[in-house]
Image: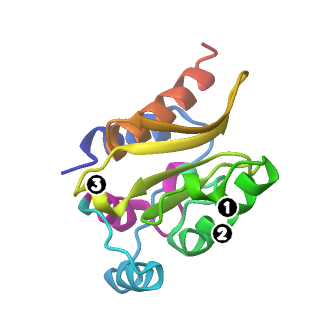
Amino acid sequence: MYLDKAKESFTRLSQISRVSREACPCTLDEVQELENSLGLPLAKAYKEFLLWAGENGGYFSSDRANWQHVRRNREDALEIMQEDGVSEDLLPRDAIVFVVYHGGSRFAFIRASEGDDPPVHEYCETFDSIGIRWNFARNLDEYCVRRIKGSIRALNGD
């Protein structure tokens, strides 16, 4: 429902990639365990992601994106910010850091207070600044599609 385009893009990537990629779902109990451990309500779109690819991170398997990582990702995100000299206050209390990118210098998050299909925000370093790009993607579906299309372009040599 919330991730239809992402799932379609993931299928296309899996068909053209030399590396077999499978999305392994979390169980409902694991989703509930994550929600309880975070102490925050999970957006319906994010729950759909977890029930589709939350066990292994699916497309994001090289990043820290599976449900077990998410329990620790906030701590990692705060450490990244501290290393960059950025105030931890910039990361909202209701942020759910759903992925820390491979290499550990960037992360993406949604906010529990922003509804069932929230925008994705990203912390990163750019040429001229370090900080959060608010509303980096309209929602989780758009975010996933962007990442997957980037991989498809890379596979095609674009």
**2 and 1 marks in contact (CB < 8 Å):** yes
- The residue that disc 1 covers is 78
The one of 108 and 65 positioned closer to us in this rendering: 108
Please provide the residue range marked out in magenta.
45-59
Residue type, numbered disc 1:
Leu
Which image quadrant is residue 89 in? bottom right
Q: Residue furthest top?
A: 158
Residue 75 horizontal/vertical position (percent): 66, 69
Residue 137 horizontal/vertical position (percent): 39, 35
Residue 27 horizontal/vertical position (percent): 37, 79
Magenta region, mostly helix, strand or loop? helix
Which image quadrant is residue 36 in? bottom left
Against 158, residue 9 (above or below) is below
The one of 139 and 31 positioned closer to us in this rendering: 139
Name which residue lies at 74% across and 61% down: 79
Against 77, residue 151 (above or below) is above
Name which residue lies at 33% across and 68% down: 42
Asked which secondary structure carries label 3, the reply is helix
Residue 114 is marked as 3
- The residue that disc 2 covers is 75
Colour scheme shown: rainbow
